[in-house]
Image: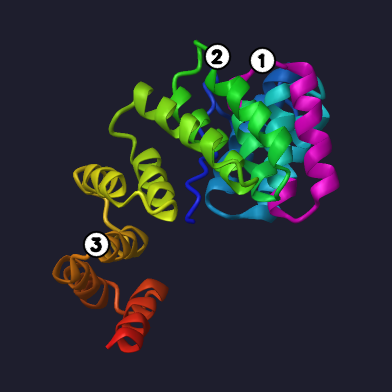
């Protein structure tokens, strides 16, 4: 399963001008925001050392900023320092317990580390917040957590709720196609697969799902068509290799 977890790195809505002096502005809170904005930019660019310097400074200047602690948590988890990352996220939640962005981001990272129960709970809380602009993202992440824990019915319920909110949300359509395929519900899997294709997003994973769906339906021609696309469009992908090997084994 290609879990489509989503972590937000949205640009902060900061007011005022960013100056080159990030160490001595008039107000510590403002200085913290400036450092945090710079740290987030570095984090998006993968410059972890620079991001750490700025985000650490943001936390130091304003230790009561939930936003700063949340991004410190994300940073330290990326650095492999799980205890520090968890501590910062838990502090962020203690400061702003109903913030859906923080809940969803932490949920995603927890479930990636197989801490499914806590992650699912936080993702559901985020998705259930009517003020959360991307509730469908929270429901998909909750579904991925539930599926990782082996709770397939609950996962399906979350994915369907995501699609109720946003019917064309590609990660939810992908997840449902894959889930239905896993349960040998081939006609339903095909329907979700075709809805995914209609979003215009093609990758090796979805084509490999298409191959297996059509094989399950006994449509060898359709399966081979998707397989040929894999070989032609993504010749070095793991999925293309799987298709080639599977054809050899059934040939």
User: How far apart are the two marked residues, 3 and 1, measured between alpha carbons?
Assistant: 44 Å
- Residue 148 x/y as whole percent: 61, 48
Question: Helix or strand or loop: what does disc 3 sit on?
Answer: helix
**Residue 78 part of the magenta-drawn span:** yes
Overall secondary structure of the magenta section: helix
Residue 222 horizontal side relative to residue 112, left or right: left
In 3D space, how far apart are the residues under numbered discs 1 and 2 (Cα atoms)? 8 Å
Q: Which mark is residue 32?
A: none
> Residue 59 versus residue 24: which sits nearer the camera?
59
How far apart are the two marked residues, 2 and 3, measured between alpha carbons? 39 Å
Measuring from the top left, give residue 106's x and y in whole percent. 67, 35
Q: Is 177 covered by the magenta stretch?
A: no
Left or right: residue 52 compared with residue 99: right
What residue does disc 2 label?
A: 129
Foreground mark, 1 or 2, reads 2
Residue at the image position 48 percent from the left and 30 percent from the top: 157
Q: Residue at horizontal 26%, vertical 72%?
A: 230
Provide the residue span drawn in magenta.
76-101
User: What number is the disc on residue 98?
Assistant: 1
Q: Counting residues from the N terminus, which is met first, the one under dot 2 or under dot 3?
A: 2
Which comes before the other along the chain, label 1 or label 2? 1
Of marks 3 and 1, which one's residue comes earlier in the chain? 1
Q: Find out whether the residues at labels 3 and 1 contact each other: C-beta distance under 8 Å.
A: no
Q: Mark on residue 214?
A: 3
The answer to whether the residues at label 1 and label 2 have Cβ atoms under 8 Å apart is yes
Query: What crowding class fits label 2: few (fewer than 14 Cα within 10 Å), some (14-19), or many (20 or more)?
Result: some
Q: Is residue 173 left or right of residue 54?
A: left
Looking at the image, residue 136 sits to the left or right of residue 208; the answer is right
- Residue at x 57% of width, y 55% of height: 46
């Amino acid at each position: 399963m290609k879990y489509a977890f989503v972590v937000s790195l949205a640009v902060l809505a900061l007011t005022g001008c960013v100056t080159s002096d990030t160490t001595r502005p008039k107000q510590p809170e403002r200085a913290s925001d400036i450092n945090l904005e710079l740290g987030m930019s570095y984090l998006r660019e993968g410059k972890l050392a620079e991001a750490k310097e700025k985000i650490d400074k943001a936390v130091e200047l304003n230790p009561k900023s939930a936003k700063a602690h949340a991004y410190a948590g994300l940073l330290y988890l990326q650095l492999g320092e799980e205890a520090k990352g968890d501590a910062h996220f838990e502090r962020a939640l203690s400061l702003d317990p109903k913030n859906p962005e923080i809940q969803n981001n932490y949920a995603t990272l927890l479930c990636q580390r197989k801490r499914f129960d806590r992650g699912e709970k936080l993702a559901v809380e985020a998705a259930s917040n009517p003020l959360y602009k991307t509730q469908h993202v929270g429901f998909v992440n909750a579904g991925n957590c539930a599926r990782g824990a082996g709770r397939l019915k609950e996962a399906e319920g979350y994915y369907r709720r995501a699609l109720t909110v946003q019917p064309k949300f590609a990660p939810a359509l992908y997840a449902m196609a894959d889930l239905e395929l896993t349960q040998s519900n081939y006609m339903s899997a095909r329907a979700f697969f075709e809805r995914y294709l209609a979003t215009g997003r093609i990758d090796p994973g979805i084509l490999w799902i298409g191959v297996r769906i059509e094989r399950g339906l006994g449509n060898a021609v359709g399966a081979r068509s998707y397989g040929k696309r894999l070989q032609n469009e993504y010749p070095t992908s793991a999925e293309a290799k799987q298709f080639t090997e599977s054809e050899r084994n059934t040939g």
